[in-house]
Image (tube, rainbow, N blue to C red):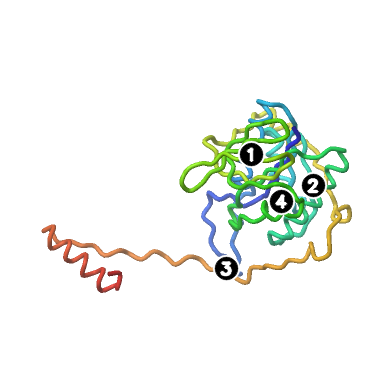
């Protein structure tokens, strides 16, 4: 089973990020790392390969600086990696177009097709949740969202799909594309040995000139005009009446004054 996991490098989401003087997010204190949902996808793929065999390749669209997340991925399960040269700023459509062209190039060079392409359900920086869907359309492959478990079959896979109300079991013919939600386990940590080996790895770059992009594929159609921080939370109203009936009456009075009731 040949599996491709699409990775995106994002700022550390555990760091509080505020807007800088330029009006752009200040990322100076946020170290680059792999997008959380993409790491879930990699862990799911790694467990699948450990149980059923296969090879995992990771790929990202971006610049030389985006290879950090690829090297981290090599330390926790991926065997191959490729950086697809792309613009520093891209919308979901451009990212998916470069991914699609890069995937075709990787497959052509290797002489074999990926059986499964896994994407995180969304990124933790822009939370768009669109790249997987657009990629499936561009590659013309079956597509399933919010997968948390994959079971192999003959020419197909059975997928456990997360719903708001529970789960659904669906089948998809191979090859297929899926987005991965949070499974009931966390991504593994690399060993010191695998981490050192990954740091020394030479990751190839697929240049833009080597990609068979269509007309308009590189044109950004959606751009961010400005950023605004969410409003600060205001202090609530403290009801100090000791009598329960008086406290309840006061609460309704406050709600009525704010036109909540």
- Is the C-beta separation of discs 4 and 2 under 8 Å? no
- Which secondary structure lies at badge 3? loop
Identify the residue shown where x is 20% and y is 62%.
Answer: 239
| Disc on the earlier residue, 4 or 2 | 2
Counting from the top left corner in percent of width and height, residue 35 is at 62, 47
- Which secondary structure lies at badge 4? helix
Q: Which of 5 and 239 is in front in this view?
A: 5
Query: What's the CA distance linking mark 4 and mark 2?
Result: 12 Å
Residue 70, visible in the rendered structure: no
Identify the residue shown where x is 70% and y is 56%.
Answer: 134
Q: Nearer the viewer, residue 47 or 29?
A: 47
| Disc on the earlier residue, 2 or 1 | 2
Residue 145, visible in the rendered structure: yes
Instruction: Specify the label residue 136 is tagged with.
Output: 4
Q: In this view, does 128 lie above or below 73?
A: below
Q: Name the residue under label 3.
A: 227
Instruction: Specify the label residue 103 is tagged with.
Output: 2
Identify the residue shown where x is 74% and y is 30%.
Answer: 54
Counting from the top left corner in percent of width and height, residue 187 is at 59, 36
Disc nearest the viewer among 3 and 4: 4
Query: What's the CA distance linking mark 3 and mark 4?
Result: 30 Å
Disc nearest the viewer among 4 and 2: 4
| Disc on the earlier residue, 3 or 4 | 4
Q: Name the residue under label 1.
A: 171
Q: In this view, does 54 lie above or below 127?
A: above
Query: What's the CA distance linking mark 1 and mark 4?
Result: 16 Å
Q: Quadrant of residue 58?
A: top right
Query: What's the CA distance linking mark 3 and mark 1?
Result: 41 Å
- Which secondary structure lies at badge 1? strand
């Amino acid at each position: 089973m040949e599996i491709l996991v699409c990775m995106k490098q994002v700022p550390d989401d555990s760091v509080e990020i505020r807007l800088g003087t330029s009006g752009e997010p200040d990322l100076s204190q946020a170290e680059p790392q792999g997008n959380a949902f993409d790491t879930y996808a990699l862990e799911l793929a790694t467990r699948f390969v450990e149980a059923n065999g296969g090879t995992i390749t990771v790929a990202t669209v971006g610049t030389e600086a985006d290879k950090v997340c690829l090297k981290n991925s090599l330390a926790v399960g991926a065997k191959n990696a490729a950086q697809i040269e792309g613009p520093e700023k891209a919308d979901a459509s451009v990212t998916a177009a470069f991914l699609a062209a890069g995937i075709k190039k990787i497959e052509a060079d290797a002489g074999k097709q990926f059986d499964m392409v896994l994407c995180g359900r969304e990124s933790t920086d822009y939370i768009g949740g669109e790249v997987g869907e657009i990629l499936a359309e561009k590659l013309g492959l079956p597509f399933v969202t919010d997968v948390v478990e994959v079971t192999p079959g003959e020419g197909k896979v059975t997928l456990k799909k997360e719903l708001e109300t529970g789960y659904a079991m669906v089948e998809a013919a191979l090859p297929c594309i899926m987005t991965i939600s949070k499974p009931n386990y966390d991504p593994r940590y690399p060993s010191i040995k695998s981490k050192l080996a990954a740091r020394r790895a030479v990751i190839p770059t697929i240049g833009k000139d080597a990609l068979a992009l269509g007309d308009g594929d590189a044109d950004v159609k959606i751009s961010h005009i400005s950023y605004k921080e969410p409003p600060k939370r205001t202090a609530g109203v403290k009801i100090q009446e000791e009598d329960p009936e008086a406290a309840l009456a006061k609460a309704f009075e406050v709600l009525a004054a704010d036109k909540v009731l």
